[in-house]
Image (tube, rainbow, N blue to C red):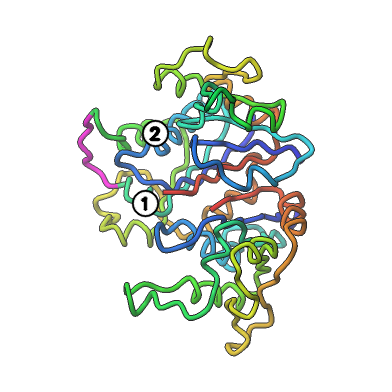
Amino acid sequence: MKLGIFVSDYKPTAQILERIEADKLGIILVLNGVYHAVLKEEGKESGLLARTPHVYALSEDLATRGLTADQVDKRVKVVNYDGLVDVMFNEFEQLAWV
Amino acid sequence: MGVLTIGCFPGLVGSAVYDFTLKLCDAAAAKGHKVNLWFSGNAAGSVKAHQKHLKDYSTGEKHLTALLEKGVEICTCEACSLARGVTKADAIPGVQWNAMHWYLAKIYSTDRLLHIGGE
Amino acid sequence: MADVKLAMVVQNPQYKGETPRLGITHAISYQTVEVLLEDGETITPTLCFVDKGVLGITKNQKAMEAYGITSTEGHLKNALLVDLDVLVCKEDLARYGIAEDQLVDAAEMGADKSIQVVPYSEIQKAISNAKHVLFF
């Protein structure tokens, strides 16, 4: 099962994210979820970034918040809406919004 | 190209989730995918016509009309819309009205489903 | 493809917003979707309650008396009456100290099905086996 999970909030993180399993798990950061790609709290980056190697952040939502590409953690792939559609169709079979 | 079905529950005014939904529909349609959009909950209030586009607010009518012109199928939950005082007579033309099974029927044959719950 | 399986997962309690309630009613609508499908095509949802979603499935809800709205209890009874599989996470019930005999049931209304309290692993199985997953 290839599951892409949309994360739209920074805090609190949905509990389901900690327990759900998939053959390929993706985290897609949108809206306020993009803060996971950028912020460090007390020097520590978001735990979501270690959850899976497949982490994406929406460029339009980064830009809306005044965040730039050089602030984004290197593990995160930045995509625009066009690229996001490709990720949804090509990388995952199931999609979820938590 | 494939079929993308999106269920949108968060409401219109002030909801960036609603804005996100419409932009995603637009991007998918622009790439040639078939897009179905279902409104339930507070999003069902967004199909009322004659909305004034103010920059501080999420806007539905202008974008919904553009999506309809691109072939996106948009359907609102009749019960949810009526509960919010929106009737077919004053709704955006082209938006379908049906019950929840419309959404399930689209889900049946969709390639990708993004169900956006929440407020 | 004759049957499409869905996992409909309620992860929040009801009565602040309506989305968790809509999870139940959307699942129930599998009963009428056939009017829009071809012969032999069916949808089989599994309705799952996890995390804080397990808070809203206990008996004796007075939503109608207090707010004039149909209670989640009422919707859940309907779900059982139309033979939906309703799975509730055992670990989350234990976390919140909810006993199984506090859960809604519809036996007195003639329902053949009851809420099934299962380990999270069974809910994960329902998610993995589904073609699509919907979180409420």
Looking at the picture, does residue B57 appear above or below residue B98?
A: above
Going from N to C along the chain, the mark reached first, 1 or 2, is 2
A51 is within the stretch colored magenta: no
Callout 2 crowding tier (Cα within 10 Å): few <14, some 14–19, many ≥20: some
Q: What residue does disc 1 label?
A: B42
Q: Which residues are magenta?
A: B48-54
Does B42 sit left or right of A98 as displayed? left
Residue occupying the far bottom of the picture: C108
Residue C112 locus on image (x, y percent): 68, 82
Q: Residue at x 66, y 40 (%)?
A: B111
Q: Amino acid at mark 2?
A: Asp
Q: Amino acid at mark 1?
A: Asn
Q: What residue does disc 2 label?
A: B19
User: Which secondary structure lies at badge 2?
Assistant: helix
Q: Residue at x 77, y 54 (%)?
A: C125
Q: Residue at x 56, y 67 (%)?
A: C28
